[in-house]
Amino acid sequence: MNTTTTRTRIVLPFFTDSLAVRHNRMMSLLDSGWVQVTYQKGDGQIACRLATRNPTLVAAYGCESDRTAISRSDTDWNATGIVYYYDYTKGSIRSFYVQDVIEVAIPADCPENNH
């Protein structure tokens, strides 16, 4: 008997007219754990990143300066819409504008499950 399970990612509802509400929702999603964020970069390319702002995950995969940079970025909002996050693939802090987000999803498998 084959017991293979195919997992699928879960696309999350995200869009709203208010930039502030989108920003707060994005921060909440990133704080909860790993999410796949698809957004348009400044040069027009589409990027899909495995991202988090969760302090425990950033401490496990990044370094203390990564955790500090993310916590300091919490006060950088000032209606700019910039979100700073830890990028699993790049292994560093990255950022995007919340208005450029195309899709947010819970990945089918997280890095912790692949060890």
Image: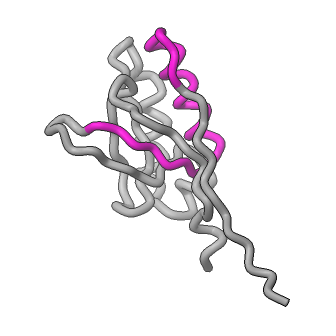
Position of 16 compared to 89: left or right? right
Residue sitting at x 40%, y 34%: 102
The answer to whether residue 63 is left or right of residue 55 is: left
Which residue lies most toward the right here? 1
Residue found at x 63% / y 58%: 8
**Residue 91's quadrant in the figure?**
bottom left
Q: How many marks?
A: 0
Compared to residue 83, the image places residue 10 above or below, namely below
Left or right for 64, reference 3: left
| Front residue of 85 and 72 | 85
Report the magenta residues as a range.
15-40
Front residue of 23 and 44: 44
| Residue at horizontal 47 percent and vertical 54 percent from the top | 50
Based on the picture, tell me whether residue 4 belongs to the magenta stretch: no
Residue lying farthest front? 1
95 in relation to 76, above or below: below
Depth check, front residue: 95 or 7: 7
| Color encoding of the figure | one colour
* Position in image of residue 71 (x %, y %): 50, 36
Residue 57 sits in quarter: bottom right
Q: Is residue 35 magenta?
A: yes
Indicate the position of residue 53 as horizontal and vertical percent values.
53, 43
Q: What residue lies at 39% left-to-right and 32% top-to-bottom?
A: 101
Q: Split into 4 quadrants, where in the image is the N terminus?
A: bottom right
Image coordinates of residue 115 in percent, x first then y, are: 62, 79
Does residue 53 sit above or below 42 in this rendering?
below
Figure quadrant of residue 3: bottom right
In the image, farthest residue toward the bottom: 1
